[in-house]
Amino acid sequence: MPQLAQFRIIHGFTRLTTKHNMTEQRKAVALISGGLDSLLAAKVIQEEGIHVEGINFYTGFCVEGHTHAIRKKDQKKSKRNNALWVAEQLGIKLHIVDIVEEYKDIVFNPKHGYGANLNPCLDCKIFMVSKALEWIKKKDFDFIITGEVIGQRPMSQRKETMPVVSGESGAEDLLLRPLCAKNLPETLAEREGWVERERLYDFSGRSRKLQMALAAKFGFKDYAQPAGGCCFLTDAQYSVKLADLWRARGSKQYEMDDIMLLKVGRHLRPAPHFKVIIAREEGESNFLQGYRKQFVTIKTISHGGPLALIDGEPSEADIELAARLVARYSQGRDADLVELEVEDREGSSHALKVEPIKPHEIPQEWHI
Amino acid sequence: MSRVTLDARRLLCPMPVIRVQDKIETLTPGTILEAICTDPGVLNDIPAWCRINGHKVVESRSDRAEYTVVIEVGEAE
């Protein structure tokens, strides 16, 4: 029996091993997305008696209930943050790390390319594991857990990409995937007897049946299963809007406000140098209100209607065209004239009366 | 008992939670942190984060479009 494993004890109890001649509780950090796989992976390792804490990375593109809940019709839906919820179910600490700035390079220049949309899934996973590695070194944890399953995702979770993630992240054998570990070479935690390889799993493929059965075994009845993952970059419509933003700016760049605004409203680009973001309902109008000092805004006066922002540097004629578009999406769409208020970034405003644009006058390509 | 205010307005979750988390790392146990936010999601998320990380929410209130969560910083482990 290896020296480090001399305190191997009964399944489900605290696992103590010796390190530097001292008895020590082994510690792992689990990447927690808020989905079922990471919940199960962390639970499996907790059952091995390892102290587990969670880490969740915020890229800015994370699909959050709150972002959806900007829309008034969605405001009655649950607003829980799934990563926090998972941590609470597991009874573990969760460390949420803001990687918005560092993540830009992954989005702009993914070494392994994009997936079906602008999703750099493989580079993303490598980056997150490398950040987790930095974290465990700083916090003196022993290894990293992910909920990866071979064959689960077409780009980042394949048999060939598993060693790419562990190798390029620098984690190597400090990275343990409890749900498919038996299909992969032994990692340090298994070799040292910190966890029992035989009690890990050999899941593979896209089916979630085995995960659902394991969830039932652990007594988890309520868990998130986001379609297409938990990232807006996997969404085709969102990716089209981001690509449009890059084209309009002449380079790949974005700020946090840009990526938030891509999630909100109806986006129309009548010309390369400006686009109009029109709220689809009251919740979005309220949200867009927060951007009044950063954009020219338009709101209807004579009729009920949405708030709209103009992104870019519009001329007077552009503003009039934008106003006609806003009128089209107001309750005055069939009126001869609709009165609107245009406010610049400094807060100066003036009224404008325009004829609502007719549907046939809006080329399909204006819709982003 | 010292009292600190954190302005997390116009941030969408989880950013207010991250700001609270990062602020608390700099505070001593017993300090009262008052987080002022505009995302109503904080009324769920900040208490959830506090529960799992050993801090106590002593008050939550909303005033029109602002949501304030008052936290007592717990003992560091």
Image (cartoon, rainbow, N blue to C red):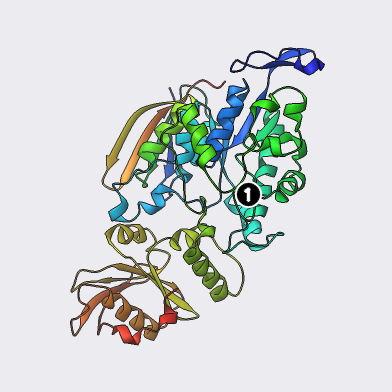
Q: Chain of mark 1?
A: A
Q: Quadrant of residue A19?
A: top right
Q: Amino acid at mark 1?
A: Gly
Residue A209 vs residue A359, the one in the foreground: A209
A63 relative to A170, above or below? below
- The residue wearing badge 1 is A151
Residue found at x 47% / y 48% = A226
Q: Point out the image quarter for the N terminus of chain A.
A: top right
Give residue A91's position: percent from left, percent from top: 49, 25
Give residue B66's position: percent from left, percent from top: 32, 45
Residue A275 vs residue A329, the one in the foreground: A329
Q: Point out the image quarter for the C terminus of chain A.
A: bottom left
The local crowd at label 1, few if under 14, some if 14 to 19, many if 20 or more residues have their Cα within 10 Å, is: some
Residue found at x 20% / y 83% = A337
A255 relative to A10, above or below? below
A366 left or right, relative to A156: left
Residue A27 vs residue A204, the one in the foreground: A204
Give residue B36's position: percent from left, percent from top: 38, 41
Residue B22 in view: no
Residue found at x 73% / y 34% = A174
Give residue A47's position: percent from left, percent from top: 58, 23
- Picture mark count: 1
Residue A269 in view: yes
A187 relative to A26, above or below? below
A232 left or right, relative to B35: right
Q: Secondary structure at mark 1?
A: loop
